Amino acid sequence: FNPSSAIPDPLWSRGLGDVYKRQVPIVVAINKCDLHEADPQKIKNQLLEHELIAEELSGDTLMVEISTKTKKNLDKLIDSIILQAEILDLKTDYETNANGVVLESKIDIGRGPVVSTIVTSGTLKKGDFFVCGLQWGKVRAILNDSGNNILEAYPSSPIEILGINGAAKAGDDFIVLDNEKEAKTLRMTFEELLVFIERNPTALNRSTVDAWIVVKEAA
């Protein structure tokens, strides 16, 4: 959050609603705290309206005042995330096909479609076939957060992937399949899913994968 402006709404509120439905733990980073006009307390007060209460206000939400420009409290932010993971005893399986969430996607001049994702389970390897919403592809290259080419990406790794056939949407599930045929089949199933959602609006309250399971069970 930018502490000198209001919280984005309603787009941000809709995103927060999805976080609540998925029961995902939240760590709030209040950025640009190096600015003279910064008012972190204003942000904390606004977050009260969304039932996010800072620990200093007797709540249970970790909030860290940071500056990516001056690097202020970035180490504290990392420690807060690690602490949250330890408290929740978060674990995942490394020895399976990778899954993740799309952070953003774009068409890059010279590189073509690029998708930024974070791996949530499994290990992503160069050459894997995958699906992102209505897009699919084969991993041609994996770049880590330093821009270096790597051969594999593990859970919690933020990466860029080359090889997708078009721009995906932020929030799409990233799913690795065993082969090209499975990837294309799942991608076609997602197209059928859109029709299903139009006819069954309550499916909008499910994740992409959950809604896909409903389609398969109804078939």
Image (cartoon, rainbow, N blue to C red):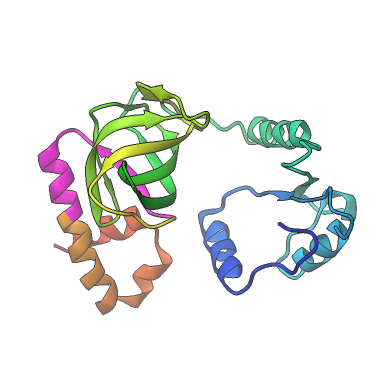
Q: Is residue 175 magenta?
A: yes
- Looking at the rendered image, the quarter that the C terminus falls into is bottom left
- Magenta range: 171-187
Q: Is residue 112 magenta?
A: no
- Locate residue 106 relative to residue 88 in the image: left or right: left
Rendering coords of residue 15 (x, y %): 55, 63
Looking at the image, which residue sits at the far left? 181
Viewer-nearest residue: 21 or 194: 194
Rendering coords of residue 110 (x, y %): 31, 42
Rendering coords of residue 13 (x, y %): 60, 69
- Locate residue 12 relative to residue 126 in the image: left or right: right
The residue at the point 61 percent across, 31 percent down is 89
Total numbered labels: 0
- Locate residue 89 relative to residue 37 in the image: left or right: left
The residue at the point 15 percent across, 57 percent down is 188
Is residue 58 shown above or below 202? above
Looking at the image, which residue sits at the far front? 110
Is residue 155 shown above or below 106? above
